[in-house]
């Protein structure tokens, strides 16, 4: 039984972006072994090694080279993994504002990793996108 939403207009209307506290780091481990005391937010195995998203402090403590410092935004709507258009709509809105974005789709929510210095602007862009969707769903 799933309450996942697949309708793009409803997803945008309900996305409710939340900025998670902290700074996150993208790192890559060529050998693919995760050092002790590292608790990844996300991992992805590539031919070049294991990519991790971890708290920046963990990367620093383990002396791992940081490839990207990011703020983490969660779209709190329960998005269907087969929904069409949410990533494109969000990425387009952020791109139009000059904000890069790395998207991770998990089982229940979409997670956006944006440059730390762009976090507040990204939240504002996403809220504007949501408000536009609100006015389309509920024309007053």
Image (spheres, rainbow, N blue to C red):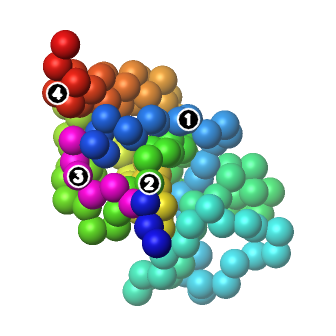
Q: Which residue is mark 3?
A: 7
- Give the extent of the magenta segment: 4-9
Q: Which residue is mark 1?
A: 19
Label annotation for residue 78 = 2
Coordinates of residue 57 in the picture (x, y in percent): 75, 49
Coordinates of residue 139 in the picture (x, y in percent): 17, 19
Residue density around tag 3, few if under 14, some if 14–19, many if 20 or more, within 10 Å: some
Q: Nearer the viewer, mark 3 or mark 1?
A: 3
Write down the quadrant of residue 16 in the picture.
top left
Q: Which residue is mark 4?
A: 136
Coordinates of residue 99 in the picture (x, y in percent): 32, 34
Residue at point 66%, 66% (across, down): 40
Q: Nearer the viewer, mark 4 or mark 1?
A: 4
Which type of secondary structure does the marked residue at label 4 adopt?
helix
Which type of secondary structure does the marked residue at label 3 adopt?
loop
Q: Nearer the viewer, residue 113 or 73?
A: 73
Q: How many numbered marks, from 0 up?
A: 4
Name the dominant secondary structure of the magenta segment.
Answer: loop
Mark 3 and mark 4: Cα distance apart in space = 13 Å
Q: Is residue 63 magenta?
A: no
């Amino acid at each position: 039984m799933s309450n996942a939403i697949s309708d793009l207009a409803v997803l945008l209307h309900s996305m409710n972006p939340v900025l998670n506290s902290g700074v996150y780091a993208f790192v890559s481990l060529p050998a693919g072994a995760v050092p002790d005391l590292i608790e990844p937010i996300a991992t992805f195995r590539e031919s070049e090694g294991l990519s991790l998203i971890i708290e920046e402090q963990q990367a620093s403590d383990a002396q791992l080279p940081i490839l990207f410092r990011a703020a983490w935004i969660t779209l709190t709507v329960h998005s269907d993994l087969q929904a069409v258009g949410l990533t494109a709509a969000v990425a387009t809105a952020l791109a139009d504002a000059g904000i890069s974005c790395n998207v991770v789709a998990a089982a229940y929510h979409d997670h956006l990793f944006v440059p730390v210095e762009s976090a507040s602007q990204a939240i504002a862009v996403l809220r504007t996108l949501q408000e536009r969707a609100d006015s389309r769903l509920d024309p007053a």
